[in-house]
Image: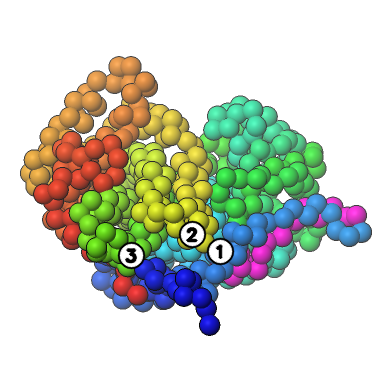
Amino acid sequence: MAPSTHTVTNQPPPLAGHDVFTSDRALAEAVERHLAPEVLPEAREELAALGVATGSVQVREWGERANANPPRLRTHDRYGHRIDEVEFDPAWHRLLGRSVGAGLTNAWGRPGGHVRRAAGFLVVSQAEAGHGCPLSMTHAAVPALRAEPELAEVWEPAALSSVYERELRPVAEKPGVLLGMAMTEKQGGSDVRTNTTEARPLAADGEYVLTGHKWFCSAPMSDGFLVLAQAPEGLTCFLVPRVLADGSRNAFALQRLKDKLGNRSNASAEVEFDGTTWARRVGEEGRGLGTVMGAVAATRLDCVLGSAALMRQAVTQAVHHCAHRGAFGGLLVDKPLMRNVLADLALESEAATVLGMRLAAAYDAGTERERALLRIAVPAAKYWVTKRCTPLVAEALECLGGNGYVEESGMPRLLRESPVNSVWEGSGNVQALDVVRVLRTEPAALDALLREVGAARGADHRLDRAIRELLGELADLDGVEARARRLAERLALVLQGALLVRWAPPEVADAFCAARLGGDGGAAFGTLPHTLDLRSLVERARVET
């Protein structure tokens, strides 16, 4: 018999066995809103099945194991042959196989594909965010590959496949492939124009060999990589396969794996191209940036969705804990100050989800106006949503008190993961400057943005005032670089406010406009006006198990 002092009381039950998709009201409503009626039933069924699996004890354990057992680099086999492979825990392969099987690399090949994929990506990232990297890059590589139709004919069907096969073999022999990217170099980072990797043309048209070193190569066990290198006519995009058509390994020397703050289940490597690394040109010589920008935009949106997933999981854990934890004579969730904190966190999470899903819907629409909206809204959303992720997760951790600081709670893993999306695909300054660039050079993008927020004008006086103030800032772009962050932030907040006013329950829109646009909120979470319907915000975020 256990000693009486070890009797466990006042601890919440495990949060497991729930449908991660259906229980997320903001996400489920976005799917209903953005999908055509003929597509919706099938998508709803698929996403609910994915949500149940993601919330299961088994898949949660896979996420924990994949994170606790990081990948290991094997440069040589037992006989001394160079193999340049990365070993992953079996749990990683199970997670990746389930997500590929759910169609999360296939947004381009089915009706409503981007909304369906975005919702699924947001769901599975809550089990373990690291495995989202190869999913994201495979998905994003498709528009770049289409710049070279012969390549796309071979690689696109395999990239869109729902089959995950981990062995490295020629693409023609595989039912499904994953694609990665190796863009940045140690001397330049996001300034890829300073890349020094050299591409030397071979006799065959479109074939080159590469010499150089890439500082970050994500998901190095992928089947092929988009790479930027300096060709005779300038910076150019290339596809570098891991295995050549004859079955031999391409020269792709993995130098080391990065020891990262978070995202530990996913391998990020340095890679060396030795002058014999075979590559196929993608697009025109000298137009590498233009070729990869479609891929960059798609991965930036995944950074928004990935941060929204981390936010949602952190809020779910915080609300669940407080709904079952007693203190000072009652449940924490019923204490006015804790309710304010939870409501504020839930508000931020919903705003991120609604914005990310709206941008996914713009991809599906495919009109020129929607494409113009994406050019300005994606960098603004990437800037703001990823910036809000870390303070939100830290506050959610605090809701669990000391329990949240313990690894077993899962909250430290979420906190370590939370900064990654603000760094990947260009950090904050890069996104803010991209917003400025679009404002200066693409009038259609600003027009699309103003039309989008204008659809909500007249519904809330605080939103209307924020729109007027934004227009005032946009009217004067002199010296704008020094205030580019402020401009990107205001743009993202106004867009979020407009979307919530149009589509969210009144209590959600009211709280957002009051605290985020009306100035009636503090710098920290938990400072919403007490007159708001905070109970409804918390109940909306709550998961029943």
**Residue 83 within the segment the image draws in magenta:** yes
Say few, some or many: other residues with alpha carbon within 10 Å of mark 3 (under 14 / 14 to 19 / 20 or more): some
Q: Nearer the viewer, mark 3 or mark 1?
A: 3
The residue depicted at 75 percent of the width and 41 percent of the height is 273
Vertical side of 512 occupied by 407: above or below: below
The residue depicted at 21 percent of the width and 31 percent of the height is 470
Separation of disc 1 and disc 2 at Cα? 8 Å
Vertical side of 522 occupied by 137: above or below: below
Residue 438 x %, y %: 36, 32
Q: Residue furthest right?
A: 79
Magenta range: 80-95
* Residue designated by label 3: 325
* Residue designated by label 1: 64
What is the three-letter code of the residue carrying label 1?
Answer: Glu
Say few, some or many: other residues with alpha carbon within 10 Å of mark 2 (under 14 / 14 to 19 / 20 or more): some
* Residue designated by label 2: 410
Separation of disc 3 and disc 2 at Cα? 17 Å
Q: Is residue 207 visible?
A: no
Q: Secondary structure at mark 3?
A: loop
The residue depicted at 20 percent of the width and 45 percent of the height is 528
Residue 155 x %, y %: 60, 59
